[in-house]
Image (tube, grey):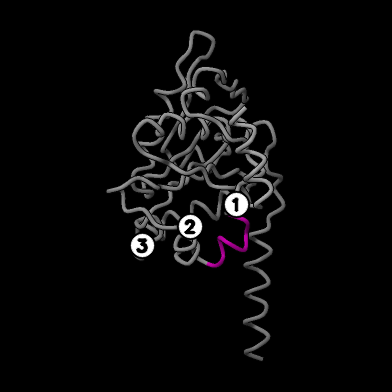
Amino acid sequence: SMLLLIQQLVTAWGAPGADRTIFIPEDRLRSSPLPQLQTKRSYHLYHSASNPCAAAIAADLEAQFVSPNHSGLRTTAEPEHLRHDACAAFLLYLNAETFAPGARADTLVSELEAALEAGTGLLLAHERRDGWRRLTFDEIIVATPEGLKTAGAYRRIATALHGGRHYAVSLRLLLDELDLLIRRPVRSHSLLGTVLRKTSEAGSSSGD
């Protein structure tokens, strides 16, 4: 089929993302069943009030995850729920405002540090729509605090949010990624604590 030919050509060229499945948007929505998202946690997803537009993406995911066979997507923006390990994953929406310097970004970084140290998986949504202050992923990387990168904030591939008829497919891909995070949870190994401790020790040594 034409789809198989395209997959083979992309693989042969070694194009970025060649290992991911290629699909036609309408086919993805018609033929792919909703994931189960089975978790014993109180909430599937945490979205921070300090992460602009994350609440809107969470609401769209809730609307997408509607089926007689599912009880619904459970989301929360209460930091208390994140602190008490009640969330299966942390939604991180990435655009030009995410890590813009200021108190809001400082709060978001603190929440992300706590989530990474606890082993909470990050569901990465990369804004690619016109008019939504999008950045390339290289620009996102540059804006991200070094500690978050070292601690593994981007160990998983971000899902691109495209506009128009592709937006519903982007949401479905986010739900699929969330399902993977739930079924294959990140092990808590306090990597961030180790990184910060070594940084502190290095600073103390240099001062001796």
**Farthest residue in the top direction?**
68
Check disc 2 and report its element: helix, strand or loop: helix
Spatial CA distance of label 2 from label 3 is: 15 Å
Q: Amino acid at mark 2?
A: Phe
Spatial CA distance of label 3 from label 1 is: 28 Å
Which one is earlier in the sequence, the residue at label 1 or at label 2?
1
Q: Which corner quadrant of the image does residue 34 belong to? A: top right
Question: In front: mark 2 or mark 3?
Answer: 2
Q: Amino acid at mark 1?
A: Pro
Q: Tell me residue 115's x, y (percent).
A: 56, 48
Q: Which residue does the image show at 64% across and 44% down from the upper left?
A: 9
Check disc 1 and report its element: helix, strand or loop: loop
Question: In front: mark 3 or mark 1?
Answer: 1
Picture disc at residue 16: 1
Q: Which residues are magenta?
A: 146-153
Q: Tell me residue 155's x, y (percent).
A: 63, 52
Spatial CA distance of label 1 from label 2 is: 13 Å
Pointer 3: what residue?
A: 100
As drawn, 97 above or below 180: below
Q: Which residue does the image show at 46% across and 24% down from the upper left?
A: 26
Few, some or many C-alpha atoms within 10 Å of disc 2 (few <14, some 14-19, many ≥20)? some
Question: In front: mark 1 or mark 2?
Answer: 1
Few, some or many C-alpha atoms within 10 Å of disc 1 (few <14, some 14-19, many ≥20)? few
Q: Which residue does the image show at 49% across and 8% down from the upper left?
A: 68
Q: Nearer the viewer, residue 164 or 207?
A: 164
Secondary structure mainly formed by the magenta segment = helix
Q: Nearer the viewer, residue 9 or 88?
A: 9
Asked if disc 1 and disc 2 are in contact, CB closer than 8 Å, the reply is: no
**Is residue 150 a member of the stretch shown in magenta?**
yes
User: Quarter holding the C terminus?
Assistant: bottom right
Few, some or many C-alpha atoms within 10 Å of disc 3 (few <14, some 14-19, many ≥20)? few
